[in-house]
Image (cartoon, rainbow, N blue to C red):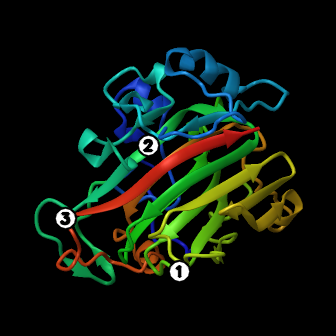
Amino acid sequence: MPALTHKICPIFLFLSFTLLSFGFCSPYARPTEVPASKNASSYQTIQHSNYSNASESIHGRGNSDRHCRPFYTTFSDPSTVADSNTNPSNSPFVALSPPETYAITSNGLEMYLQRPKGEVHSANGMNDNLGEAATINSTFWMDSGKVTYEVSCDYVPGVVCAFILIDAVQVSDGEMHLDEIDVELVGSGSARWQTNIFKPSKADPEPHYGHFDTKEQYPQNPSYTSFHKYSISWDSEKIVWGVDGQDARTMRKEDTYINGVPHFPGESDSLRLQLGIWDGSGAEGTSTWAGGPVNWDTTPQKIVATVRSVSVEC
């Protein structure tokens, strides 16, 4: 992805401690955004009623050991995703966006990008009014393991669907940790899917947006509008991205050095799962990368990303 013309961290938008604790700040974020039946014998399903304890076990911050607990959901239970205005401790996911931006349906979890309210004017490859969209975080953290997102995304130039691992927390010295490991379905073309990492360092003269991104092919059904299973396997030495059971890209820790500075995400912090769809039309570099800006004159009122299942293996 090309360097952004600007980036604003939206943590300050969250007015309560609960939302802050599940805060979102992506290097690709627009400025105003911050199970059906399955043979789950290989998974240890975490029941919602016990999720507070499970979250503590998975989180593992401050411990020297790596932590991971198997998990699987098809979003058949509405309580899988907690509303941002409620206590999310008993749910594996919490919505950071308004209730109208997502729904639990017979298809799974549907996340929406809605047409902006009011008029939209385009200039210099950007829109001055952006659609409101869904962002959903897990309430648990991982230190290692394999996450698989089974998803589809509408293809609309200017729109990005993202299924990632993220750390967006403020540490004791006031520094924001913004590690990411990304799978992105980008509106510049539906025949490829993209991978990326992001880990800013104080030693960097400027953030390295897009330095590590790649475009990957599909082994079959070559469009992200079809359902595919995207995986991120992560440990202290490497990251492996895959699609539909086939490895697509491997990045080792030693591959992440820039001018002698390491940029391997998750070294010092655990990561959350994050699911989202967003309007990439708000910044020139982002809009170009996303194939935007969104043309709302020819675009449906609601753009949809559907999550059929999410699994964690350890």
Q: Give the label, 1 or 2, closer to the camera.
A: 1
Query: Residue 179 in the image: x percent, y percent?
Result: 65, 49
Element type where label 2 sits in the image: strand
Query: Residue 274 in the image: x percent, y percent?
Result: 52, 46
Residue closest to the far bottom: 124
Query: Residue 234 in the image: x percent, y percent?
Result: 76, 49
Which corner quadrant holds the C terminus? Answer: top right
Query: Residue 193 in the image: x percent, y percent?
Result: 57, 72
Residue 136 is labelled as 2
* Residue 267, above or below 293: above
Q: Earlier in the sequence, mark 1 or mark 2?
A: 2
- Count of numbered marks: 3
- Asked whether the viewer can see residue 170, the reply is no
Name the residue carrying label 3: 301
Q: Give the label, 1 or 3, closer to the camera.
A: 1
Q: Amino acid at mark 2?
A: Ile
Element type where label 1 sits in the image: loop
Quadrant of residue 68 within the rendered picture: top right
Q: Earlier in the sequence, mark 2 or mark 3?
A: 2
Residue 312 is labelled as none
Q: CA distance from mark 2 to mark 3?
A: 21 Å
Contact? badges 2 and 3 (CB < 8 Å):
no
Contact? badges 1 and 2 (CB < 8 Å):
no
Few, some or many residues within 10 Å of mark 2 (<14, 14–19, 20+): many
Residue at (27%, 54%) from the top-left corner? 132
Q: Amino acid at mark 3?
A: Gln
* Residue 254, above or below 285: above
Contact? badges 1 and 3 (CB < 8 Å):
no
Name the residue carrying label 1: 191
